[in-house]
């Protein structure tokens, strides 16, 4: 049973990745595609949490604990925070591009944008 609990974050990350990828593939609306991309990228949060978590580990604040105490990995937490910032920037940029595409073509369907020339 404990092995299943250790694999749980990776299973959830894989499920989120598949759901986001399926949404992007089947999307007929650009805003829907951006939201699905955000869901896909959310799988990396769960994956990083699964990698950095240690059972029984303390928070990585070393000011008041013994140096040999088991802690969770602080590097993975920093990577996850960086991932959150990158996702926010990417989603904002993509939504701005969707607005520009709507202004130029009057549609947010990817199939209608094939006729738009720069």
Image (tube, helix red, strand yellow):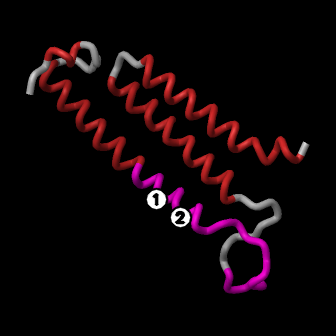
Asked if residue 89 is positioned above or below residue 104 in the image, the reply reads: below
Q: Residue furthest left?
A: 118
Q: What residue do we see at 56% from left, 27% from top?
A: 19
Q: What residue do we see at 46% from left, 59% from top?
A: 82
**Mark 2 in CB contact with mark 1 (< 8 angstroms):** yes
Asked if residue 53 is positioned above or below residue 97 in the image, the reply reads: below
Q: Nearer the viewer, residue 108 or 47?
A: 47
Residue 16: x and y in percent read 59, 34
Residue 21: x and y in percent read 49, 28
Q: Kindly identify which numbered label has been placed on residue 82.
A: 1
Residue 35: x and y in percent read 43, 32
Q: What residue do we see at 57% from left, 41% from top?
A: 43
Q: Which SS class for mark 1?
A: helix
Q: Kindly identify which numbered label has been placed on residue 78.
A: 2
Asked if residue 28 is positioned above or below residue 6 in the image, the reply reads: above
Residue segment shown in magenta: 62-86
């Amino acid at each position: 049973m404990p092995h299943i609990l250790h694999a749980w974050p990776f299973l959830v990350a894989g499920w989120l990745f598949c759901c986001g990828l399926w949404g992007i593939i089947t999307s007929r609306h650009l805003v829907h595609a951006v939201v699905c991309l955000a869901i896909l990228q959310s799988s990396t949060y769960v994956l990083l949490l699964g990698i950095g978590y240690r059972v029984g580990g303390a928070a990585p604040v070393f000011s008041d604990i013994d140096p040999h105490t088991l802690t969770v990995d602080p590097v993975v937490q920093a990577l996850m925070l960086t991932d959150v910032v990158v996702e926010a920037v990417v989603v904002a940029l993509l939504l701005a591009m969707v607005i520009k595409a709507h202004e130029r073509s009057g549609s947010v369907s990817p199939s209608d944008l094939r006729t738009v020339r720069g």
